[in-house]
């Protein structure tokens, strides 16, 4: 059983604002808190349902010119301390994967396949902005599909896409910020431990787990949570073309299927295959129509100029069959190969 570094994990989880669905945070904290005095922690708490033990979140598949990039599990800023079976995906790894996909000459567009309850707040807005910038730079569209969940930080990433699809049972939302403080002072007393801090700077010991959270420390954490929440609201409002008040009115709730469309948080309900087919058709239509502007209710998208700006990589696929290719950013093959697609979806 693979295990994580508990001191690093505790520092990451507690007294730090997160953009994660509360139910998922409950699972993680319930697994971590009892282990703080008892050694290493199995990593399964971070996996999202069936993602535990699956292939690592690196690489992508190409289907009919659409690169499908998986965004799975709990999201963290850096992945250097993770292993493949941890159920975690890093923002740095996702950025590299999207950049790699968009740079492929035979990739017409990117589809983010998202099944995540969110994760760390730090770095997620930069990733979303980078995805939109890469889309414009390569003049290739990026869509997202919630299959089955795009919550909190994962939804912030989805907002960078030109279109958001979701499965009929899929959920999006949880536009909020949450922070947990662990007061283990009573557990310390039962264990015969009494902590003394020698410090300079009145705020240096604020939020430490060995004493109850003071009013001033709680107010400081609340202010930090509020600031990040306002950033989240502005982010969604900008990318989705909604008013900030409409975002606040969701009260960090989740919206399933058609309810997400009604709330303005998604654009279409359908399967992943239907989203891929629609994206292929959209790009092909743009190619055959001479590069007309692709606009939406959220404003002009990646293709905002005339025929001279049409990307060379966007062209109709002459073959009616589906070409499927798997590419790993770390072990990219020297020669491209095309094989018939398997019946089951391929992830790497």
Image (cartoon, rainbow, N blue to C red):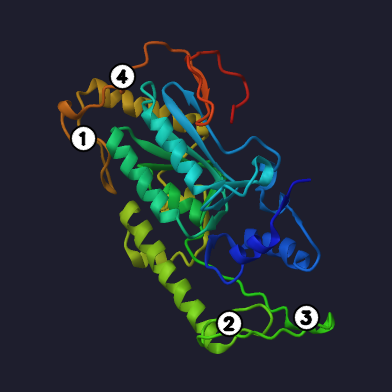
Q: In the image, what residue occupies the spot 33% across and 38% down?
A: 135
Mark 2: which secondary structure?
loop
Numbered circle sitting on residue 188? 3
Q: In the image, which is nearer the foreground, mark 4 or mark 1? A: 4
Q: Residues within 10 Å of mark 1 (few under 14, many from 20)?
A: some
Left or right: residue 26 versus residue 336 is: right
Give the spatial CA distance, label 3 vs label 1: 64 Å
For label 2, the residue is 205
Mark 4: which secondary structure?
loop
| Position of 277 relative to 119 (above/below) | above
The answer to whether mark 2 and mark 4 are in CB contact below 8 A is no
Mark 3: which secondary structure?
helix
Q: How many numbered dots are placed on residues in this image?
A: 4
Give the spatial CA distance, label 3 vs label 2: 17 Å
Give the spatial CA distance, label 2 vs label 4: 60 Å
Q: Give the camera-side residue of 56 and 145.
A: 56
Give the spatial CA distance, label 1 vs label 2: 55 Å
The answer to whether mark 3 and mark 1 are in CB contact below 8 A is no
User: Is residue 159 something that shows in the picture?
Assistant: no
Q: Earlier in the sequence, mark 1 or mark 2?
A: 2
Q: Give the camera-side residue of 15 and 70.
A: 15
- The image quadrant that residue 209 belongs to is bottom right
């Amino acid at each position: 059983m693979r295990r994580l570094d508990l001191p690093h994990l505790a520092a990451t989880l507690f007294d730090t604002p997160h953009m994660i669905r509360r139910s998922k945070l409950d699972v993680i904290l319930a697994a971590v808190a009892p282990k703080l005095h008892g050694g290493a922690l199995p990593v399964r708490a971070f996996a999202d349902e069936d993602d535990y033990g699956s292939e690592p979140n690196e690489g992508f598949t190409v289907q009919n010119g659409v690169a499908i990039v998986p965004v799975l599990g709990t999201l963290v800023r850096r992945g250097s301390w993770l292993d493949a079976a941890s159920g975690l995906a890093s923002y740095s790894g996702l950025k590299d994967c999207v950049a790699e996909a968009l740079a492929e000459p035979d990739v017409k567009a990117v589809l983010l396949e998202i099944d995540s309850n969110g994760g760390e707040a730090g770095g997620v807005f930069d990733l979303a902005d980078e995805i939109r910038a890469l889309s414009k730079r390569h003049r290739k569209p990026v869509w997202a599909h919630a299959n089955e969940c795009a919550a909190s930080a994962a939804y912030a990433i989805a907002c960078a896409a030109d279109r958001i699809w979701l499965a009929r049972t899929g959920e999006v939302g949880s536009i909020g910020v949450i922070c947990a403080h662990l007061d283990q002072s009573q557990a310390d007393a039962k264990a015969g431990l009494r902590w003394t801090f020698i410090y300079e700077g009145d705020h240096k010991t604020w939020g430490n787990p060995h004493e109850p959270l003071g009013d001033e420390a709680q107010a400081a954490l609340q202010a930090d949570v509020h600031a990040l929440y306002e950033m989240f609201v502005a982010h969604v409002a900008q990318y989705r073309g909604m008013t900030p008040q409409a975002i606040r009115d969701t009260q960090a709730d989740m919206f399933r299927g058609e309810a997400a469309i009604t709330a303005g948080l998604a654009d279409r309900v359908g399967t992943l295959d239907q989203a891929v087919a629609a994206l292929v058709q959209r790009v092909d239509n743009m190619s055959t129509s001479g590069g007309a502007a692709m606009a939406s209710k959220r404003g002009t998208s990646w293709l905002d100029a005339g025929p001279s700006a049409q990307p060379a990589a966007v062209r109709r696929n002459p073959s009616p069959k589906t070409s499927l290719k798997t590419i790993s950013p770390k072990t990219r093959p020297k020669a491209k190969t095309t094989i018939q697609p398997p019946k089951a979806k391929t992830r790497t």
